[in-house]
Amino acid sequence: MENEIDPLLNRDDELHAENNLLKLKLGLEYGMEMTEVSPLSPDVENHWLKSVYAWESAYKNAKRVKLYDYIGRPEFPKWDSLTPEQVSRELERIHTIMENNSVHLSSICKYDDTTIYKFITEELFEHEMDDMRVLGMTCHFTYEEFHPNHDYEIRERAADFVRKIFRKQWNQEYDGIILSDKIFFSGATYDRKGISTIVSTFQDAHSSLRLHKFDTHDVVIEPDYVKASVIADLSAMGKMKDGEKVRYIGACSFKLEREYDYWQISDFSIPGFGNR
């Protein structure tokens, strides 16, 4: 009888069969290569495969629309006609409308409500997006995608480099990206692998390292946003393998270059680093 369930098949067998069919359809219709063996349970994998198939199907047929049309063209007053208190209330209302339409806006840094409200109503509303809706999926935007905060990124790049060194968290494969292809250090030029070797040697010489303070200041960004420099104050402690305790205190300096919208360290000096 058609659609009759084979009594010899249990629930997992049924899910395995359905999952294999979904993988076959994803491969034939969308060119996706799916592995036969999955670390997921059959039930979880089934849910995931259905979500992927629903997204791919919606994306294939989606048209491009302005975000403002996507969320139903809500009425809104202009930012310069509102008091700060009114702006905050309107911003909350617009955020709610966006969230109800599975659209989310976040920011890495803190900005006043007027800045965000103006951005949403004058820029984000005009942004084109795919006109598709998939249950459980949200379209996410970040303010800094449209307005990069170079000062924040530069400070974070220098701080992240120092944290990785003095917390023994450096990983050449993943962290090397914060360095330029060529880095000037201690009177010589190195590639990423060379700096990673110096970092590893420094860390291996210590049984422990502890970062107490790293405060960046005097950030200078060139007008074309291609090069920048940073001065920072460092305070750190270390214990050598032979038991000797050492302190690393003083001013650090960094030079950075921006390539493909990403700031990378091209020159640096850290008190005591590279001497051990």
Image: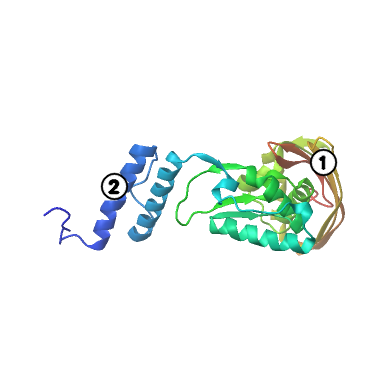
Q: Position of residue 150 (x, y in %)?
A: 77, 45
Coordinates of residue 136 in the picture (x, y in percent): 47, 57
**Disc ID at residue 121:** none
Q: In this image, 16 relative to 237: left or right?
A: left
* Coloration mode: rainbow
Image point 62% across, 50% down: which residue? 141
Q: Nearer the viewer, residue 163 or 198?
A: 163
Q: Where is 8 relative to 267, above or below?
A: below
Q: Nearer the viewer, residue 237 or 232?
A: 232
User: 71 or 225, which is in the foreground?
Assistant: 71
80 in relation to 185, above or below: below
Question: Please, what secondary structure does the residue beneath circle 2 have?
Answer: helix
The residue indicated by pointer 2 is: 21
Q: Which residue is mark 1?
A: 228
Q: Is residue 144 visible?
A: no
* Residue that appears at 19% across and 60% down: 9
x and y percent of residue 120 in the render?
Answer: 68, 50
Q: Residues within 10 Å of mark 1 (few under 14, many from 20)?
A: many
Q: CA distance from mark 1 to mark 2?
A: 54 Å
> Which residue type does callout 1 highlight?
Ala
Label 2 crowding class (10 Å Cα cut-off): few <14, some 14-19, many 20+?
Answer: few
Residue 121: tell me if it is visible: yes
Q: Amino acid at mark 2?
A: Leu
Locate the N terminus and report the quarter of the image it occupies: bottom left
